[in-house]
């Protein structure tokens, strides 16, 4: 094996399981023991479903012994952000208000993972209601690379667990960067799909038109495995798109012939030198792999990133109308402030936000008609420490800078793949992303696999774990 067992990529583990060299029960027991030993310090899990996971692993083992293989996820231990309804398992979305909620059915994506034969280890920590920060009464996960630094917004538990080898992949959600931020902070690969590519049925809502469900893993190939299991139309989510078959073996790991748009002014707008240097290394690998760099001009993202909180706040106020303000005492300050902002916005002001979003979407569609991908950082600096993060929360312009490369593509609904692209001098991971036209998940995964064929950033792991 090229890695310790707990750090194998899913495609490597799947080959070992399907060949009979590894048992799903053996792998699941190893993961549960590792969670028991390490997660007290990392705090990535809110609920561990050990008995259920072992039962699923034993079922997978029996099925595989009979020659019944459900696909590449059969017998693979995964985990879920704690906002996906999971039958019989507490699901609270990071909110003490819902501490006693136990769903009676699975979210569509959870049901699809079960059908694919995955072993579900438990539910992962997250920020309150999938917004900015944890509820003050609940613990926050710790970054396995450095406990003093940010773990990356709402899918933080998912990022920590995958990075620390406490599951092989996870599902997260991204409304302004919450798959991509944890991937950048924890050295992972994660996909925010096209809006509607993955069903949101059975998922706690933050902002309906901004919420994207997507996979987080240790490689682009693994992200593709997860996406192929969860994507597709769902009659229970009328906003879900028609099914698209993603043929995993047919997607080549090459930049050959791909046109990658580069806007040098945009990529340097307040971006730290370490991030700029990392992007230069990625550009060199694109060219080395046969891709073409094209100079482009990205539509102005300042307005849509400045407007994001108002855009999100109105929709969050609608999502929480049954419990806010009637149960406002159960809410933390960050989520309360967002909802109050949304409730206070006039209809005319919200229409201006929507018109700006339409402008950005149209200009971006025109740009992407001439290139296959855009390259961008995930954020303009490495994961901040907790003091820097507190300062960001108090400064609207710093906060806008943080989300300027992520939130605009939630507003437009375009897919984006976050990838490791290096490290700071202090050893913290750095992240970049490729953005594609709507429906472009296959080209994103192709580019991600091509980059990871030419680099080993995704194979680096937190020291001591």
Image (spheres, rainbow, N blue to C red):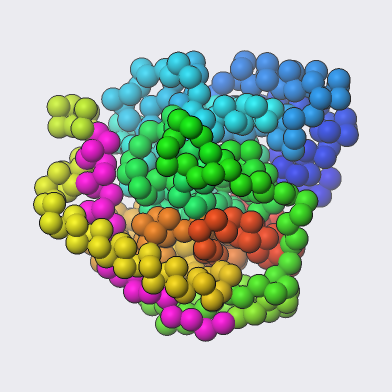
Look at 58% across and 43% down and name the residue there.
243
Q: Is residue 270 magenta?
A: no
Residue 304 coordinates in the image, percent (x, y): 30, 64
Look at 82% across and 40% down and name the residue there.
15
Residue 139 coordinates in the image, percent (x, y): 39, 34
Note whether 113 is above or below 164 in the view shown. Answer: above
- In which quadrant of the rendered image does the N terminus lie? top right
Observer able to see residue 449:
yes
Observer able to see residue 457:
no
Q: Is residue 304 left or right of residue 243?
A: left
Q: Which residue is more in the foreground, 256 or 50?
A: 256
Look at 42% across and 76% down and name the residue there.
298
Q: Is residue 360 left or right of residue 77?
A: left
Q: How many marks?
A: 0
Give the main secondary structure of the magenta stretch. helix
Residue 202 coordinates in the image, percent (x, y): 44, 29
Look at 76% across and 27% down and name the residue there.
24
Q: Is residue 184 left or right of residue 250?
A: left
Note whether 78 is above or below 438 in the view shown. Answer: above
Note whether 403 is above or below 201 in the view shown. Answer: below
Task: Please give the range of residues in magenta.
Answer: 294-320
């Amino acid at each position: 094996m090229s890695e310790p067992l707990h750090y194998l990529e899913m495609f490597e583990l799947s080959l070992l399981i399907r060949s009979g060299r590894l048992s799903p029960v053996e792998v699941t027991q190893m993961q549960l023991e590792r969670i028991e030993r390490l997660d007290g310090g990392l705090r990535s899990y809110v609920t561990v479903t050990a008995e259920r996971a072992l039962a699923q692993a034993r079922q997978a083992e029996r099925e595989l012994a009979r020659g019944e293989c459900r696909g590449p996820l059969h017998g693979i231990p995964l985990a879920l952000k704690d906002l996906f309804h999971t039958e019989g398992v507490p699901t609270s979305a990071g909110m003490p208000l819902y501490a006693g909620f136990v769903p009676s059915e699975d979210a569509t994506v959870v049901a699809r993972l079960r059908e694919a034969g995955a072993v579900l280890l438990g539910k992962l920590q997250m920020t309150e209601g999938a917004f900015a920060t944890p509820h003050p009464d609940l613990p926050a996960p710790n970054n396995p690379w450095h406990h003093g630094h940010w773990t990356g917004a709402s899918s933080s538990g998912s990022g920590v667990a995958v990075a620390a080898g406490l599951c092989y992949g996870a599902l997260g959600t991204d409304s302004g960067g919450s798959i991509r931020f944890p991937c950048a902070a924890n050295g992972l690969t994660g996909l925010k799909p096209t809006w509607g590519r993955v069903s949101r049925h059975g998922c706690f809502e933050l902002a309906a038109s901004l919420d994207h469900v997507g996979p987080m893993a240790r490689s682009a190939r693994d992200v593709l495995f997860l996406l192929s299991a969860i994507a597709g139309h769902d009659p229970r989510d009328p906003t879900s798109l028609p099914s698209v078959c993603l043929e995993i073996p047919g997607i080549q790991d090459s930049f050959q012939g791909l046109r990658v748009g580069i806007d040098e002014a945009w990529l340097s707008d307040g971006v730290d030198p370490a991030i700029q240097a990392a992007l230069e290394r990625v550009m060199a690998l694109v060219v080395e792999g046969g891709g073409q760099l094209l100079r482009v001009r990205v539509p102005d993202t300042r307005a849509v990133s400045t407007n994001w909180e108002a855009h999100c706040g109105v929709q969050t106020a609608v999502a929480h109308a049954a419990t806010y303000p009637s149960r406002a005492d159960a809410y933390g300050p960050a989520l309360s402030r967002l909802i109050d902002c949304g409730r206070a916005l006039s209809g005319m002001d919200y229409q201006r936000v929507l018109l700006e979003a339409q402008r950005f979407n149209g200009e971006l569609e025109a740009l992407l008609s001439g290139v296959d991908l855009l390259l961008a950082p995930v954020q303009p600096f490495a994961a901040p420490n907790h003091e820097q993060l507190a300062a960001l929360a108090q400064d609207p312009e710093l906060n806008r800078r943080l989300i300027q490369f992520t939130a605009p593509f939630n507003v437009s609904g375009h897919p984006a793949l976050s990838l490791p692209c290096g490290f700071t001098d202090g050893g913290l991971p750095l992240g970049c992303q490729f953005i594609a036209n709507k429906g472009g998940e296959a080209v994103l995964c192709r580019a991600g696999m091509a980059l990871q064929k030419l680099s080993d950033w995704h194979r680096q792991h937190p020291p001591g774990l």
